[in-house]
Image (cartoon, rainbow, N blue to C red):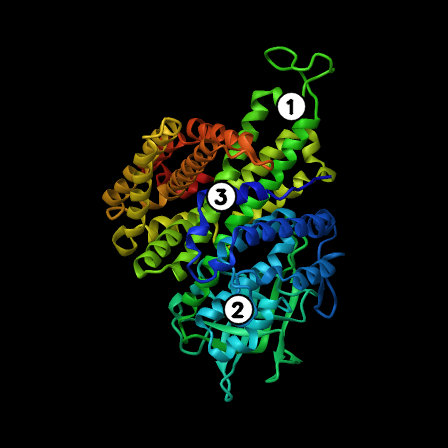
Amino acid sequence: MPRYNPPVRDTRFILDRVLKIDNYADLPGFANATPDTVTAVLEEGGRFVAEVLFPINHSGDQQGCTRHPDGSVTTPDGFKEAYQQFVESGWGTLSAPEQFGGQAMPHVVSTAFQEYMISANMAFAMYPGLTHGAIEALLAKGSPEQQEKYVPKMVSGEWGGTMNLTEPHCGTDLGLIKTRATPNADGSWSITGTKIFISSGEHDLTSNIIHLVLAKTPGAPESSKGISLFVVPKFMVNDDGTLGTRNAVTCGSIEHKMGIHANSTCVMNYDGATGWLVGEEMKGLAAMFIMMNAARLGVGLQGLGIGEVAYQNAVQYAHDRRQGRALTGAAEPEEKADTLFVHPDVRRMLMEAKAMTEGLRALCLWGGLQVDLSHKAASEEERQLADDLIGLLTPVIKGVGTDAGYRIATDSQQVYGGHGYIAEWGMEQYVRDARIAMIYEGTNGVQAMDLVGRKLAQNGGRAVQTLFRIVTEEVAAAKAEPELTHLAEALEKANGQLQAATMWFMANGMKDPNQVGAGAYSYMELMGTVAIGLMWLRMADAAVAALAEGDDEAEGGRAFYEAKLVTARFYADRIMPNAGALRRKIESGAETIMALPVEAFGV
């Protein structure tokens, strides 16, 4: 059976020494994030997920959710009890506003806890995860009355939340939706239509579920410009906050899926359900994108979370399993065979997993900090810079993060050999669970097109130029440090490849949009290589400083920092060189991708 140990030491290293969040103590919410408090959150949160959520991960996958004839859904054994403990412990309130019952901790701190929760039990983590996205949308676009009615109990975890976008005939192209909203005399709306792939659409964890639903109003144009957003509660909410009658929204079925079996992915039927407009009519897509952007960052965390737990188990298996001898001679002659760690190819897979998980952790936490700074930084200039960076990097964190998570899961399964294919070892579940993260909240191809089609050109390319400037300045500073020179030079080359690819898009994209489309995915991978490389430069710099200070604390110490430097060199030598190949793919253009006649593909 698998195991999981929350990486508290590594998280603290990133928060304390790389991001240095104590430098932001004068900003709203950060005063609560003292080193002692953050350590307590990480250690206690890690203990909670390891002891309460992780033990029901495998059983929940095996059992799945059950839909009953009346349309109700029950989650697997143990989930309801675990969710009650989650609510009672206040884990869902970490970064929520105090005025609605939250703890107002920085988003970067709750991001760290969310990673642990995903690693321990991804399907469980999705229930409160979708609720947080719905809260964000209501806080940004909802009326004061809507916020007062729904948000406090969503923050507390008493009520859940969902986002309802996809329909049987449309996914990414939301302009095609058929769900209709017709106005009622009392100011409410009647919502009619069918939504599919609705995560946490119906379940028994909360007493109410607050659905945010995209629909079209009478006379709205048949495009994405005609979409409105509505809040539709499962149970009507009375003026005193108590629950009233059941609304006309039901779960028609649960999807039969490859993975995340313990999360109820539902077909939702709206049969004249009562809802209320959120924000302005026909401005629903902008409101929904608030949820989507939050969800995309959360899905990027899913890539990291699954990659981390899969990697941990592969490392343990490599320690325990003895097969063959080292190429240089028996490492342990007294044993019948050496451990898997003597084999370079096994080490290749484990080192790639280590370099990517630790790099992604730093990138996700840096992204979480940018979310905080975009709202709370002292000056408008700082808020704008943070907003630019997180807007640019959201599709990268989602796309590159989930690609890496799936690859790490499959490589970790590979370390097990045949045992990795057997369910009782748990690795095949991680492969199955990781796969969906590359698909939902906009497939990774959509993320790539969002990056090159929208984010690059926004505000005259201000965001990508900011990234180039940050990398250039930090590389220049690092080259003065002998321990960092090699890594800095590798990152400088990769950043040059990214800059050249960006210029190629500018020169060729306007003439033929297919040139951009054909190179978009490689460009996303290239930016991810540079962004994670920047994180490794920062982590190596922090490790060098810690070693110079003689930081040999018992829970990490010299060995921890020296391992950081070795892993940084590995990233520079084995992963950063991919940047050149990715640029060459981009500059090969669209001709060979688009040239083949459709008939030549066969059927």
Q: Secondary structure at mark 2?
A: helix
Task: Looking at the picture, tell me which residue is in the foreground, 14 or 22.
Answer: 22
**Mark closest to the chain's N terminus, 2 or 1:** 2
Look at 71% across and 58% down and name the residue there: 82
Tell which residue pokes out farthest to the bottom in this image.
185
Up-down relation of residue 224 to residue 17 (above or below): below
What percent of the width, then of the height, locates residue 599? 43, 42
Q: How many discs mark residues in the rendered view? A: 3
Is 1 displayed left or right of 463 in the figure? Answer: right
Pointer 2 residue: 98
Query: Regarding mark 3 in the picture, which secondary structure is present there?
Result: helix
Q: Quadrant of residue 318?
A: top right
Per the rendering, the mark at residue 14 is 3
Identity, as a three-letter code, of the amino acid under mark 1: Leu
* Residue 412, horizontal then vertical, whole percent: 61, 34
Q: Which mark is residue 340?
A: 1
Q: Amino acid under label 2? A: Glu
User: Which residue is depicted at the point 59% across and 25% down?
Assistant: 346
Numbered disc in front, either 2 or 1: 2
